[in-house]
């Protein structure tokens, strides 16, 4: 007897996300310099018949670090095992991961900066010499068990590269920063995703969606999925400029991709702190947001747009922020910008 499993919304979205993930090297749009460097490393390792150097990718969430790891594993014709820094809580967790790898496998650790220091110490010999020493017992009766590991490639990903200790960072043969995407690259990504989802989208609609995507492919694809819903319910299934504008308005996303939380943060900076400068702790307290949320989610995009600036005294709203929110610019704020 067969049982039909009903997918939850989260599982359905995850399945779609997996479908939209690039399946071949040429499908990965953007980050051209990184792709070229990594491809050279992979091809050279193949000629030497050995695993490529360990790799570290860093940058904002949604820029394609995990997708790169999948593609590298495909290029190597290897299996990929995926975990995250917080998931490796004990030495046993790390030992189980490493001993279950096969020769040439790829181990991908997301948010690698969140690995605890004790685990990190055990990771050093594993990625340098492909061995792991585990101490069994305590005191005079303690014994050291040496585990020989298959040769593998570690790929680490992080949004906070500054939190990775120098000893761990130095053990990666390639360290690459993923940058925000250009408008044209996002349009290509959206068109590819629309083709996969079998959604007809007009060029003007592509332009608006790309400009509202915060220079990030993951956000672009998420917006496309939401706009597709509106097109199917309120339109003829075709994503037009009017449908996109209506959908983004309903989602409270403006023409440059700012959501309610972004605008609220700018308003607090301008109205409560007179445009700044203000320290991150004060800004977090006033906005009821976590410091990490401001640093990782809001600030990079707002700085990329030139809406806020960092000074020696703290954050400051620029004239562009005043103009965008239609608030009168305070001329004396110009002296704070560096």
Image (cartoon, rainbow, N blue to C red):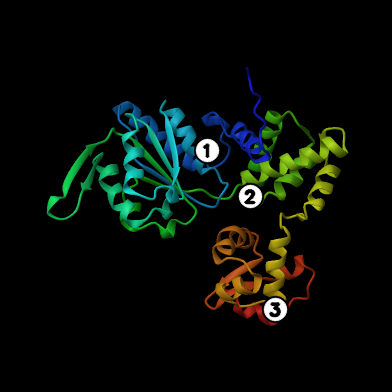
Q: Which of marks 1 and 3 is nearer the N terminus?
A: 1
Residue 301 as seen in the image, left or right of residue 312: right
- Residue linked to disc 3: 272
Is residue 317 shown above or below 88? below
**x and y percentages locating residue 219 in the rendered image:** 65, 47
Residue 326, image x and y in percent?
Answer: 80, 69
Q: What element carries label 3?
A: helix
Structural distance between the alpha carbons of marks 3 and 2 = 29 Å
Q: How crowded is mark 3: few (under 14 residues within 10 Å), some or many (20 or more)?
A: few
Nearest the viewer among 101 and 140 is 140
Q: Residue furthest left?
A: 140
Among the 4 quarters of the image, the one containing residue 45:
top left
Query: SS class of the residue under badge 2?
Result: loop
Q: How many marks?
A: 3
The residue to which callout 2 is attached is 215
Instruction: Identify the secondary structure beneath mark 1.
Output: helix
Q: Is residue 180 above or below residue 202?
A: below
Residue pointed to by mark 1? 67
Tell me which label, 3 or 2, sits earlier in the chain: 2
Residue contact at pointers 1 and 3, CB within 8 angstroms? no
Residue 133 at least partly seen: yes
Residue at 39% in and 33% down: 42
For the residue carrying disc 2, how many other residues have a C-alpha within 10 Å: few (<14), some (14-19), or many (20+)?
many
Q: Real-space Cα distance between discs 1 and 3?
A: 41 Å
From the viewer's perspective, tell me whether residue 201 is left or right of residue 162: right
Quadrant containing the C terminus in the rendered view: bottom right
- The residue positioned 72% from the left and 57% from the top of the image is 259
Q: Which of 306 and 218 is in front in this view?
A: 218
Label 1: few (<14), some (14–19) or many (≥20) C-alpha neighbours in 10 Å: some
> Closer to the N terminus: mark 1 or mark 2?
1
Between disc 3 and disc 2, the foreground one is: 3
């Amino acid at each position: 007897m067969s049982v039909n499993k009903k997918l939850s919304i989260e599982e359905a979205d995850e399945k779609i996300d997996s479908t939209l993930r690039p399946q071949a090297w040429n499908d990965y749009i953007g980050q051209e310099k990184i792709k070229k460097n990594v491809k050279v490393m992979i091809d050279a390792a193949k000629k030497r018949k050995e695993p490529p150097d360990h790799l570290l990718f860093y940058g904002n969430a949604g820029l394609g670090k995990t997708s790169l790891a999948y593609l590298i594993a495909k290029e190597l014709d290897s299996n990929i095992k995926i975990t995250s820094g917080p998931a490796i809580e004990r030495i046993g967790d790390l030992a189980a991961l490493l001993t279950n790898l096969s020769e040439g496998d790829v181990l991908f650790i997301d948010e690698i900066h969140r690995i605890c220091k004790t685990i990190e110490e055990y990771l050093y010999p594993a990625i340098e010499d492909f061995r792991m020493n585990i101490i069994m017992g305590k005191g005079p009766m303690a014994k050291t068990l040496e585990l020989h590991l298959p040769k593998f490639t570690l790929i680490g990903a992080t949004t906070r590269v500054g939190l990775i200790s120098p000893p761990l960072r130095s053990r990666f043969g390639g360290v690459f920063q993923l940058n925000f995407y250009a408008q044209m690259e996002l349009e290509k990504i959206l068109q590819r995703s629309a083709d996969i989802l079998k959604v007809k989208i007009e060029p003007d609609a592509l332009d608006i969606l790309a400009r509202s995507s915060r220079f990030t492919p993951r956000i672009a694809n998420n917006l496309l999925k939401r706009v597709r819903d509106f097109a199917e319910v309120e339109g003829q299934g075709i994503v037009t400029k009017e449908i996109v504008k209506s959908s983004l308005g309903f989602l409270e996303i403006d023409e440059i991709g700012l959501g309610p939380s972004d605008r609220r943060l700018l308003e607090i900076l301008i109205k409560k702190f007179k445009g700044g400068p203000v320290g991150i702790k004060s800004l977090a307290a006033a906005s009821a947001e976590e410091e990490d949320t401001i640093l990782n989610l809001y600030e990079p995009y707002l700085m990329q747009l030139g809406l806020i600036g960092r000074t020696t005294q703290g954050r400051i709203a620029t004239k562009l922020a005043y103009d965008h929110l239609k608030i009168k610019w305070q001329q004396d704020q110009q002296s704070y910008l560096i």
